Amino acid sequence: MGISQVGWNMREYTDTHEWVDMQGNTATIGITDRAVKEIGEIVFIELPKIGAQLTKGAVFVVLESTKAAIDICAPISGEVVEVNTALKSDITKLNTTPETDGWMVRVKSCANFPTENCT
């Protein structure tokens, strides 16, 4: 990903089909429609807790589909400030609208987004 300035509203996509929507100092993270199609119907999600520290490249979400369990790695580092708890009761949002209503977490990012060492 090639974002170098904070404060812009922009969405970036990773090679592994995660997306990051940067708005100010907060990044919303999710997976793409293509990822959902490759994974198959998602039936369970394990989300991190608010306050958790994400490390770029480390597993932060576990998905279970009708095919397999899948680890989703964080595309950026930062502190989780919000989780999409609606996914716990209505996982269909992740299956049908992963790039809007199916977002996973919101993360407080560093001034030099993206970064490995966000504190």
Image (tube, helix red, strand yellow):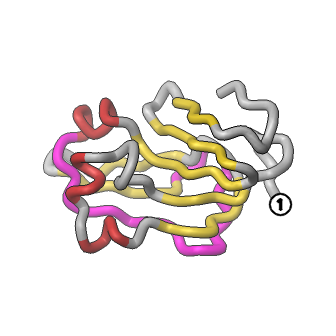
Give the residue at x 64% y 44%. 22
Q: Nearer the viewer, residue 78 or 99?
A: 99
Give the residue at x 65% y 27%. 1
Residue 42, magenta (yes or no): yes
**114 relative to 15 in the view: left or right:** right
- In the image, residue 83 sits, relative to residue 26, either above or below, namely below
- Segment tinted magenta in the rendering: 40-59
Q: Nearer the viewer, residue 107 or 39?
A: 107
Q: Can residue 56 be seen? A: no
Element marked by disc 1: loop
| Residue at image mark 1 | 119
Residue 20 screen position, x and y as percent: 56, 41
Amino acid marked by disc 1: Thr
Q: Main secondary structure of the magenta part?
A: loop
Q: Residue 35: name its quadrant.
A: top left
**76 relative to 71 in the view: left or right:** right
Q: Which quarter of the image is occupied by the C terminus?
A: bottom right
Disc 1 packing (10 Å; few <14; some 14–19; many ≥20): few
Give the residue at x 33% y 55%. 63
How many marks the image carries: the answer is 1
Residue 28 screen position, x and y as percent: 56, 52
Give the residue at x 73% y 50%. 24
Residue 86, magenta (yes or no): no
Residue 89 screen position, x and y as percent: 25, 73
Q: Can residue 111 be seen? A: yes
- In the image, residue 118 sits, relative to residue 49, either above or below, namely above
